[in-house]
Image: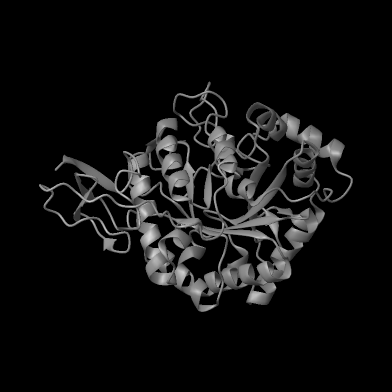
Amino acid sequence: MRRSRLAAAGLAAATFAATAVSLVLGAPSATAALSSNWYAAAPYLMPQSNNPPDPVTVMNATGLKAFQLAFILAPNGGGCTPTWDGTSAVSSDTAVAGVISRIRGAGGDVSVSVGGYGGTKLGQTCGTVAATAAAYQQVITKYSLKAIDFDLEEPEYENTAAIANELGAAKTLQANNPGLFVSVTMPGTAAGTGWFGTQLIDQAKSIGFTPNNFSIMPFDGGFNGGSSQVSALEALHGLLMSHLGWDSATAYAHEGFSGMNGKSDAAEMFYTSDFQTVYDYATSHGLGRFTFWSVNRDRACVGTTDNGVCSNVPQNDWDFTKFSVRFAGATPPQTTPPVTTTPTTPGGGSCTAAEWDRTKVYVKDNAVSHNSHRWTAKWWTQGEEPGTTGEWGVWQDNGAC
C-alpha cells in the first residue's frame, strides 16, 4: 500500500553518508533494550532512500528514542539472504550499521521492518519456515535487535505459502530471542482488515503464534480522516476477539495503528488533527502500538511535492513524530489491563432503552440508557461505558432522557 516508499532513492542525505563512513567499525554495538513502549511507538524511517533526515536531529528536536528502519527484502535477483531494499546485503552492510550506531550513541535504539509494499520478500523466496527464520536471524544478530516488525503486504500478502513462512519464522524468532518485541503489520480496510488479513490472523492462531500486536494501515483504501481510521480500528478489535477468542481488553492491548502522515498514495489527506483523533482513541482504549509512515515525510514540502520526502500538508518539521513520543510516554499496556469497575447509575424514569450492561455485546444502532441519557452504539462494543469514550468514541449521546 505504500507506493511512495522507494521514491527519491537517490536523495540520501549527506549527513547519513558521512556518519556511516565515520562510525562503522563493524556491527553496531549492542545497547540495553528500551521499554517496549518505545518499540511500539517507533515510526518508520528509510535509512538509505527518500532523503532520510539525520536521526539524531529528529531525536534532539522531539525526544524520540526509537525508529522502525525499513525494509529488509530478498535480493532483487532472487535468493534467501537478507538485503536492504533488495540491493544491499545485510552481511556486508556498513551504511545502515552506521545509522544504528549513531542512534544508539544518542541513547536510542531501532526496530527493523521486514517486507513492505512491493519488492520480493524472503517469505516468497525461502522455501521453508526454518530457512526464512534463519535469514531473519542474521538481521537480528548483525544489529543486536530487540524488536522486529513483519510488514506483510502485496504481493506476498496474498500468497498463502509465503505468509505461512513469515508467521512461522516470526514464531521461531520469538522463541529463540527471549524478550524480542514482534509486531505484525497488514493493510487496513473499513472492516478492520480484508479477507487476506483475516486469513493471516487465523494462520497465526493455527500455529500458536501471538505477536505483541497486530497492526493495520488504515490508508490507501478510501479512508477520510481520523474518524474513519478509528472506525476501522474498532472493527479490527471485533475481528481479534471473534477470531482469536480474546476478551475486549486483551484485543485492544494487542492491537496497533500504523498510519500515513499527510497525503497518502491514494490522495487521502491526514492532518495532525486526524492523528490527534486516532491518538486519543488509541490511548483511551489501551492499544498496543501507534506508529506511522514515515519520518522521511514528516516535514512540509518546500520546492517539491514528492510524497516520499514531505507530507503535502501544513506542518512544522517532526509534528507527526511528536505523537510517537507522546504514545511511548502513555505506557500502552502489553498485557490484559484491569477492568474498570465504575458503578452504573440507573437511568431516569423517562429513559425507555434498557440500562447499559458492561457484560453485554452491542452492535451499531443498539440503544441503551445510562446516567439519565440515551446512547446509541456507532459500532461493535463491549465493556465501554457510555460517557467515558469521548466525542470519537463508540457511544453517541442522544441527550437526556
Q: How many marks?
A: 0
Residue closest to the eye, 89 or 359? 359
Quarter assignment of residue 172: bottom right
Q: Is residue 393 above or below residue 306?
A: below
Residue closest to the eye, 269 or 40? 40
Horizontal arrangement in the rendering, residue 258 relative to residue 178 (left or right) = left
> Residue at (71%, 48%) from the top-left corner?
34
* Quadrant of image for the C terminus: top left
Horizontal arrangement in the rendering, residue 108 relative to residue 396 (left or right) = right
> Residue at (56%, 39%) from the top-left corner?
324
Q: Is residue 135 above or below residue 286?
A: below
Q: Is residue 180 visible?
A: yes
Residue closest to the eye, 166 or 383? 383
Q: Position of residue 87 (x, y in %)?
A: 69, 53
Q: Position of residue 341 (x, y in %)?
A: 40, 55
Q: Position of residue 348 (x, y in %)?
A: 16, 46
> Residue at (74%, 51%) from the top-left corner?
33
Q: Is residue 149 above or below residue 317?
A: below
